[in-house]
Image: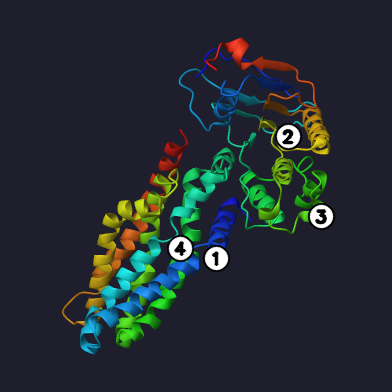
Amino acid sequence: MSGFTSVVVQTAQLSLRAGGGALVGLIFFLAVVTVIPFGVGPDLNLLARIGPAILWIGALLASLLGLDRLFGGDRDDGALDLLIVSGQPLTLIVLARAIGHWLATGLPIVIAAPLLGLLLNLEPLALAAMTLTLLAGSPALTLIGTVGAALTAGLARGGVMIAVLVLPFTVPVMIFGVSAVNGAIADPDPFIAPLLILCAFTLGAGVLGPVAGAAALRLALD
Amino acid sequence: MFSGVEFSLVPGELLTLTGPNGSGKSSLLRLLAGLLRPAGGSIELSLGAKDGGQSGRATAEAEGQSDDLIHYLGHLDGLKPVFTLHENLAFWRSLYGAGDDDIALSIGDAATKVGLGHLSDLPVSIFSAGQRRRASLARLLTAARPVWLLDEPTAALDADGEAMLGGLMGAHLASGGMIVAATHLALPVTPAQTIDMARDLGAAA
C-alpha cells in the first residue's frame, strides 16, 4: 500500500473506531433535521420549501464536528513529527487526511440526506438534487475545515475555534448548494450553474486546502 | 538557545549529546530532523555509495534535510492507541518505505526483535511506557534509513530493553549507519564523539 492510501485508510479507521467522531457527526445531522419540524410546526408545504436549507445547514454543522481530532491527535502523540520526517510531501499527507475524513464523516451524511429529506416532505426530484449537491459540495466543506483543523492543531480545545474560523468560508458553499436544490424544484431558477459552482468550490478547495493546511502545520511546529 | 555547534559524522559512528535539562539536546535533534529551522548556519547530509561493491546504489545528496535518510525517535511515540501494534508499524512502514530490503525487517520480525512479538495483535492503548518505547524502536527496524536521531532512547526501558537497544544500535552502526543520540545516561554503546551541550557550547542552561 502506498503512503498516500495508507494515510487515507488510517484516517478513516481512526474516525470510525471507538472514540472517533464519525458516528457523532451523523447523529448530530439526524438530530438537527428531526428537531426542526417540531419547532417549525407540521406545515408540510413550509417544510418542503425550507427542507433543502435545513439539510444543508445540518450537513454543514455536522461536517465541522470531529475536525479537531484530525491533526490534534497527530500533534499530541508525536505522529506529526514522524509524518514530516518521513519525507513524504506534507501537502499530500494533508490531502490524504482530508479524503479519509470525508469518507468517514462526509459520505455517510450524503447517504443519509435523502432519507432525512423524506421527513421534511421533499419531493423525489428534490431528494435526488439534494444528494447530488451534497456529493459535489461536502468535500469542499471538509477541505476548508481541514485548514482550520491544521491551524488549531496546537490548541487543547480547538473544536469551537475551528467552527469560528471556518464557518464564514463555508457559507458560499451552502448558498450555492441550497440554490441548486431550489433550482431543481422551481422551474425558472437554474440548477446546473450553481451545481457547477459547487464542483468548482470543491476543486479549488482541493488545491488550496492542502497547501494552506501544510503551511499551517509547519507553522504550528516552530 | 545555542550556537557554534559543529560536527561531522561518518558512517558507523555514534554521536551522543549530553548536558543538563534544557541545554538544547532535543532542539538540536529536531533541527537535524528538519522539524525546526536553524536561525543561522546549515546542516548538510550527504550519502555516498556504500562501500562493499554496491555500485548500483544511488547517491543522494541534499542541502538541509534529505527526504528519506532519517529516522527520528522523540519523546512521543506517534503510535495510535486504538490500532494494534501491527497496524501501527504497517502504517509507518508504508510511509517510510521499506528501503533496503536486506536491512529492513518485516513487521513481525521487528516486533519479535524488540520483544513484542506476542503482542502484535493487541491495541497499543494497553501497552506500558516501556513497551511503547520498544514499539517505537521496532518502527526504526521496519524501514532502512541510515541516520537515526534518538532522543533519550533508554527512557522507560528496563535492563533487558537497554541491552536490546545496545544490540540494535551496534547492528545499525556495523551496517554503516549513523546515530545521533541525546541522553544523560550512559548508553550501552560507546560513542565515537560526544558533545556536552553545557560545557562545549556554553548553552544557557
Which residue bears the numbered disc 2?
A: B56
Marks 4, 1 in one chain: yes
- What kind of residue is marked 2? Gly
Disc 3 versus disc 2: distance between alpha carbons? 38 Å
- Would you place residue A165 above or below residue A136 in this image? above
- Camera-nearest label, 4 or 2: 4
Q: Mark 1 falls on what kind of element?
A: helix
- Camera-nearest label, 4 or 1: 1
Asked whether disc 4 touches disc 1, contact meaning CB atoms under 8 Å apart, the reply is no
Q: Is residue B119 left or right of residue B38?
A: right
Badge 1 crowding class, 10 Å Cα cut-off, few under 14, some 14 to 19, many 20 or more, is some
- What kind of residue is marked 4? Trp
- What kind of residue is marked 1? Leu
Residue A54 in view, yes or no: yes
Tell me how the rendering is colored: rainbow
Marks 3, 4 in one chain: no
